[in-house]
Image: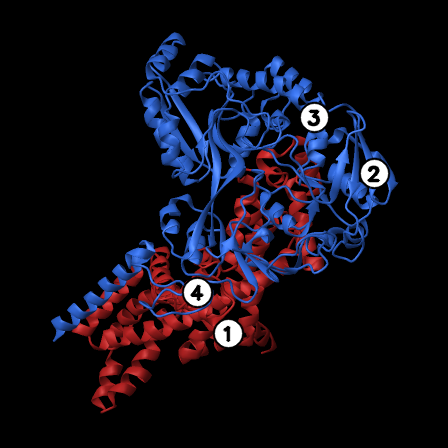
Amino acid sequence: MKKQVIKALSLLVVVMFIVAGCGGQPAGSGGSAATTPAGGTAPSGAAPAKVTVEDDTLIVAVDAEGVTFDPFGFADLDSGFLVRQTHEPLAYLDGTNPEGNTPVLAESWEYPDNQTIRLNLRKGVKFQNGEEMKASDVVFSIKMSKTKGLVSPVNWQNLDVENAKIIDDYTLELKTYEPSSFTFAWLLSEMVSIVSEKAYTEQGEKYGRNPNGGTGPYILTDWVAGDRVTFTRNEDYWGEKPQYKTMVLRFIVEGTARTFAVESGDVDVAYSCPTADLNTLSNLEDYQVIRQKTSGVNYLFINTQDQYLKDLRVRKALSYALDLETMIPIAYNNMGTVAFSVFGPSAPQQIRPDIVYTKDIEKAKALMKEAGYENGFNLKIIITDRASRKTLCEMMKNAWAELNINLDIEVLELSTILDLTMKGDYQLTIMAEGGFHGEAWRAFLHSDGVNNYSQYRNARVDELFDLAVKTADIHEGAKYYNELQNICAEELPMLPMQYDEILNVARKDLFYSVDPTYNFMAARFYYIRHN
Amino acid sequence: MGRYILKRLLQLIPVLIGVMLLAFLLNEIAPGDPATLLAGGESATPEKIAQIRAELKLDDPFILRFGDYVKKLVTEGNIGISYKTKQPVAAEVAHRFPQTFKMAAISAVLASIIGIALGIISAIKQYSFLDNIIAMFSLLGVSMPVFWSSLLLILFFSINLKWLPSSGFSTWKHWILPCVVIGTSMAASIVRMTRSSMLEVIRQDYIRTARAKGQVERVVISKHALKNALIPVVTNIGMHFGVLLGGAVIIETIFVIPGIGKYITDAIRNRDYPVVQGSVLVLALANSFVNLGVDLLYAAIDPRIRTQYRNMGKAKKKKTALPLGGKAA
């Protein structure tokens, strides 16, 4: 009797483990049970129910919680997500096409000369506080962006907003202090959100939690810290209204928990799922997997002032020893592509430089020998706790072992890494950066760049940045950026490794448009429609 | 008794000052700069960083900042404003603490019911088949990491059976999985503690006497044995409960519950010093109250301890009265 009970109990435990383990199996294999609408229940083994979004509510899982809806008070991408749902810019910049801006609150624009832009605003656009958008609101917003905006770059200060000319309620002219290919590009990007002057001034510090001065298609109705934000449709929206009356953004920070939320049917869309779950998610019957390119580039930053790494031959040897074509797909689970230029794919000025490093171990060894380091040395790389980076570093360690280099991998928190890289107190690190214009890389490559982690100094590079940004004609400016990319490929202050891609999942009955701009701040979930 | 409680409450003051100082010091020596993270991390400019440092008074000397913090705490009851969200830490803690408390309380009740019941059965049926099964259960519960059992239960109940949601906290259904995970892990430890404590007690002479007098076994166990065996068990539950208040971060992360544990770990990662300091202070306070509650429970369970607490006050009175009385005599 006792033996029978023990057997029965053991069997029960085993069955539970097996059934639970079947969660990762393809839906078609019979291992996975039916997917049901959010909150619904279905017994195991029931026929798969067709999934539809219920109750006119769209539930989206995102990977982080922003801190504010104030378009000028954030420096983090996660707040950018929130701001995109309630606020709009003058235009969206299509990074794949230098002249491909999509008009939003500005209906059109023209350039009377190379230092002036005339904006023709859309008429009849209402802010969420009921006020109509006027040219004065646009001037106010640009001023705020210049003075308060945490994400504003150095060359944004080139815009002379103090002397903005308001021609009428819907027309205004702005000038730059100097000709620039960058300033107007930034103005016509979604980095500059337009707010109601009245609403923003009245709310003051509270605006970040009560954002009633945007023109966006969704209105914030509830914010449960650490859990979710809820939006309702803006019935006075000037454009095509969102299909869903309510949209909920759930903050599910842990990647596996996001995958589980999809698998259990708790969410309609999940943003930025773990790439390790690609196969599991691809096999779900009721969901589609969407790969979204971003402007992010994963770089190997090299401290060019380090005792070993200041030698260009060593930097080149390190690069020639790496087989990125093999390493990148493994480290990033076949997401993204191998990088070739320091500029990201979102920069229209990106070219394929004359030098692209492919594995050539003999050449690498010869360079090490020439530099007098035939017997190698010790190097240390500091990285954040990301699986892809750790895998990449392990592969780099193996590859560089052939050069007798011993790579020590240290995992640190981002704040500590930033602390060390800002001081130049490191040898190697991997970080992701991005931008939609060549000027964005000034921060990393110019001698005075605010994020010149590589401690890189090259007078010609500095000159090229200045020449390019002061050239109003973007095509003419391109030649400077071409030379710049070639110099960086030759001198390797940072080795571009991977152009990033994120993994999104949406129910199959939804149409999820992939943002063509590559801009990773551009997640506008209200574009999601029924198929 | 009241005097005892008052004394314990007064003892809280130096404890809280010590906790505050420690939290401040640890933040001070931790690497990383909150201003850099607030200014955009990798894209932060030195000007913005300097501006934020000045706004947050991060360049002020340590003593000045600590003094300012204590002053605001005492005069305004302000435990700080989050660097990141610009929201009062008290409000954020007030939103998050109830979720953690609810989870800890439900889990503790569940664990106590299961743990004590199984512990008693295990003790009175020592070396039996049932005892072995319970031992196996408690071994499994103690050794299985909570993240593992969480994932297993989600896969089984949320993904395969679709009975329960995998994350969130808005309905009672959401609380089942996290509480079961914590409850079973905690119950396993309570079972072992109850069993050993009960075994010790039921070998005592007064239990033998009760049985010899013909007392019903149920009464012997529940009235004579259990009451005396409960003291270490209550201590164990209290300790677990205290740990859960601040340390359920894995469960909170997996089940997406905005609790205090996750709040603190996020704040540490973001170098959000006021949140770390404020939350640690609240947790220290909560733990002190839990300890006090446990001490009071001792008194409720054991009349000897009750008398001891009562006599503590009287003894002091006597101590101070005696010399005066001597003089008068």
Residue B50 versus residue A94: which sits nearer the camera? A94
User: Pointer 3: what residue?
Assistant: A181
State which mark lies toward you, 3 or 4.
3
Q: Position of residue B185 (x, y in %)?
A: 34, 63
* Chain coloured blue: A
Q: Position of residue A67 (x, y in %)?
A: 62, 50
- How far apart marks 1 and 2 lie (CA) works out to 86 Å
State which mark lies toward you, 3 or 1.
3
Q: In the rendered structure, the residue with mark 1 lies on which chain?
A: B
Q: Share a chain, discs 3 and 2?
A: yes
What shade has chain B been given? red
Q: Are marks 3 and 1 in contact (CB under 8 Å)?
A: no
Q: In the rendered structure, the residue with mark 4 lies on which chain?
A: B
What's the residue type where badge 2 is placed? Answer: Leu
Label number found at residue B315: 1
Q: Secondary structure at mark 2?
A: strand
Q: Secondary structure at mark 1?
A: helix
- Residue at x-position 58% and y-position 29%: A347
- How far apart marks 3 and 2 lie (CA) works out to 20 Å
Task: Tell me if residue A504 comes above or below residue B310 in the rendering.
Answer: above
What's the residue type where badge 3 is placed? Answer: Ser
Task: Tell me if residue B269 comes above or below residue A227 in the rendering.
Answer: above
Residue B121 versus residue A370: which sits nearer the camera? A370
First reached walking from the N terminus: tag 1 or tag 4: 4
First reached walking from the N terminus: tag 3 or tag 2: 2
Q: Position of residue A474 (x, y in %)?
A: 67, 24
In this picture, residue B91 sits left or right of residue A132: left
Q: Share a chain, discs 1 and 4?
A: yes
User: Pointer 4: what residue?
Assistant: B165
Label number found at residue A172: 2
Q: Position of residue A219 (x, y in %)?
A: 67, 58
- How far apart marks 3 and 4 lie (CA) works out to 51 Å
